[in-house]
Amino acid sequence: MPFRPKISEKPRRATLALAFTFIAASLSAAQKPRARDLGVPFDGTPGPYNAITDVKGVEVGHTTLISGSGKLVVGKGPIRTGVTAVLPRGKDSLDPVFGAWFTLNGNGEMTGTTWLEDSGFLEGPVMITNTHSVGVVRDAVIAWRIKKAPPDSEGYDWSLPVVAETADDDLNDMNGFHVKPEDAWHALDSAHSGAVEEGSVGGGTGMVCNEFKGGIGTSSRVLSAKAGSYTVGVLVQCNYGWRNQLRIAGVPVGREIPDHPVKDDDIGSIIIVIATDAPLIPTQLKRLARHASLGLGRLGSFASDGSGDIFIAFSTANPGIGANNGVHDMKMLSNLNLNPIFLATVQATEEAVVNAMVAAETMTGINDHTVIRLPHDRLREILKKYNRLEK
């Protein structure tokens, strides 16, 4: 049974908004236009949902917290934040997966990576939230896992969760610590397969990307390698980028839309989660994580000094490989067969970021600061101008 924490009978203002925002996000997941719907051309073949959940077993859940308006009052709001959970084998599995991580630029945080690096295993979910809520989300994951699982064979109950962040302080009262344990638990318990809610949801609620409204985006690729057919899925929480560097489908979209600037430099961060069902070992997954950088490069990112560009990759192949019972047999794809998977990662990363910006809506947050969405009609006009509009 999923962990159902007790919540006070007098819910917080942010929690009152949770039910509406979660339901609204769920209902709109299949209705919001995505980048391909607007005629943005991409290479490669997406999976059925064009989402990280096209990798069998992967589930994604969000908690979205939106309340208040007007002047910032630390501790009271306005609130524009949340939590996103990515579960490699779903919320009902405790089976670890092979994993690896990579930092393109390290002005950010992803907990649990020292053990991930040494052990080669990702044990539990990948959580994403705002910068100042990493601690509470980390502790909440530990409590959730202890509740779900008995101690190991030696009597130990312990966990080193992977929790990553980007800063939403352009729109959110980030120093108000509005993310609570029950918000992390809700993201975990509500995780599901199928279509993934994108844009201003979950950990991406208050994020800004290339000076447009950013947030959560996802994409996938199905491919055939010499050794079999596989899927690669990517989920991003994008909060990076300088408007005048933004390129979409090779077109300088950012320079064509100079309206409503937000920053005067590339200050921000992006977290990228890469999933695949290809049988890759940790050293290969490290290589896969690095290739997400090339997808960002296609979009104009140069990973500035102020940006935390941190990526994690995992493989759902080899179930049971983490069991503590001696010698294991496993499958591993030859390095000579990795090129299609590298290419799929680059392509899906590029599309996931654009999907996040296309799905996001204009948002007004603290001190009535407004960040506009990427305007769909103007994007189509610009792509047509450069002969890149697909339809």
Image: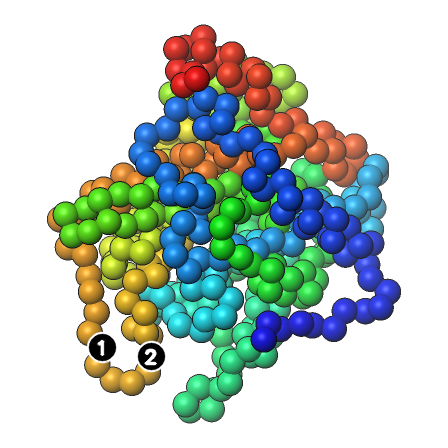
Q: Identify which residue is drawn at 62% across, 22% down.
A: 261
Q: Identify which residue is drawn at 43% across, 17% down.
A: 391
Q: Which mark is residue 241?
A: none
- The foreground one among 20 and 12 is 20
Q: Amino acid type of disc 1?
A: His
Q: Identify which residue is drawn at 53% across, 36% down.
A: 356
Q: How many marks?
A: 2
Q: Is residue 225 above or below residue 256?
A: below
SS class, disc 1: loop
> Residue 337: percent from the left, percent from the top?
16, 48
- The residue indicated by pointer 2 is 323
What scheme was used to colour the molecule?
Answer: rainbow
SS class, disc 2: loop
Q: Earlier in the sequence, mark 1 or mark 2?
A: 2
> Residue 83: percent from the left, percent from the top?
61, 54
> Residue 11: percent from the left, percent from the top?
82, 62
Q: Amino acid type of disc 2?
A: Ala
- Look at the image and tell me whether residue 267 can be seen: no
Q: Is residue 300 left or right of residue 17?
A: left
Task: Tell me if label 1 and label 2 are in contact, CB under 8 Å.
Answer: yes
Q: Residues within 10 Å of mark 2 (few under 14, many from 20)?
A: few
Q: Identify which residue is drawn at 49% across, 55% down.
A: 193
- The residue indicated by pointer 1 is 328
Name the quadrant of the N terminus.
Answer: bottom right
